[in-house]
Image (cartoon, rainbow, N blue to C red):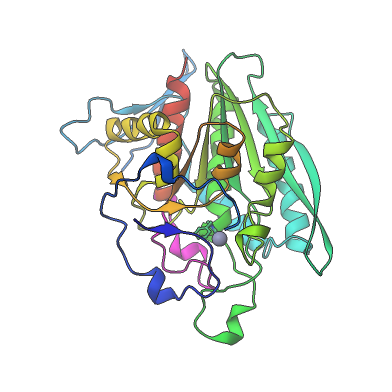
Amino acid sequence: MREVRHNVGMHRANFLFRLRRHAVMFPLALLPFALGGGCSPGSADNSTGVVTSPVASPSASAPTASVPGPAFNATRAFADLEKQVAFGTRVPGTEGHAKTRDWLLEELNKTAGNAKRQDFTYKVPGGPTLSMSNIVARFNPEAKTQILLCAHWDTRPTADQEIEPDKQNKPIPGANDGASGVAVLLELARKFAAQKPNVGVQIVLFDGEDYGPTGDNMYLGAKHYAKNPAFPKPDYAILLDMIGDRELSFQREAYSDMQAPEINDKVWDAAEALGRKEFLSGVGRQITDDHIPLQEAGIKAIDLIDFDYAPWHTLDDTPDKCSPASLKAIGDVVAKVVYEEK
Ligand code: 1BN
Ligand code: ZN
């Protein structure tokens, strides 16, 4: 069994040790709830307002070949990834952080129309008190079924996986680790605004996920949200983290599969129906992430994460390591799950 918890000393060579392609079984009792530690372009039928995106389905077991709703615009999503990186590093207390926060609020207001900042502070042990903000917005508040979609928007202050000591204290660009999940959610919000799903969608962009250096000072926005939810308890939550890798492929995250296997099933079934080969069978590593505080608050929560990413927590986590196709793979699968809920 492999567990991935934050470890400043974890060497990149160690990180690159790839065991993740193998399925691993985890006994439920071992769930550690302690936080210390090829799609063609879409076609539009303007008479009905319904737009579908045909998807190539190479798998023989792929009966469904369309994604409900307007086409996921991968070019626009990737531009949103690049825009976040262009703001600079999104470390709490920096100019890039404040500018990105304001832009996220503005962008989500264009689609949901009700975006809000959920401000909170975090006192760094022996250091300053930092101002942080989760950004929240929702679609269909009146719907009975509610789904929470989330990602973190902050970036790590220290490139602790760099080999050269001089680089280890510098902040990471966070193209994949930070900007990718947010980019997908901003584009999904445009879809939901253009064609309403049957269910309610709560979008929460968490701050302070990657502050660190250890688990005690990470997942800060998710911990705050779990104690101070802006919206009623959702039926389930899907977290997107590090899903922009241009070589995207990942298994079910292990803690997700222990606490909410049926939600993983929904996602992997949608991926299979779309012929999405990025979604591998089997269960991978245990990764502590923003879904854990949600799980601890009693919300069924899964993390879609491709942790097999060589530039993780280095200065090389830049847009060229990511791709529009990867954002679309995730966006299409999550859209299918959301639009097919009743
Ligand atoms: C994900 C992206 N995480 C940090 N940046 C959470 C994590 C923490 C993943 C420790 C692996 C180890
Ligand atoms: Zn990180």
The answer to whether residue 136 is seen in the rendering is: yes
Q: Residue 177 or 261: which is nearer the viewer?
A: 261
Q: Residue at x 67, y 45 (%)?
A: 223
Where's residue 118, x and y in %?
77, 40
Is 85 above or below relative to 44?
below
Where's residue 32, x and y in %?
50, 48
Left or right: where does residue 61 sit relative to residue 92?
A: left
Left or right: where does residue 303 sit relative to residue 59?
A: right
Q: Main secondary structure of the magenta part?
A: loop
The answer to whether residue 253 is seen in the rendering is: no
Q: Residue at x 30, y 40 (%)?
A: 276
Pick out the residue farthest to the front.
29
Where's residue 258, x and y in %?
41, 39
Q: Residue 215 or 45: which is nearer the viewer?
A: 215
Pick out the residue farthest to the right.
129
Pick out the residue farthest to the left.
60
Residues drawn in magenta: 306-325
Where's residue 310, x and y in %?
41, 68
Q: Quadrant of residue 256?
A: top left
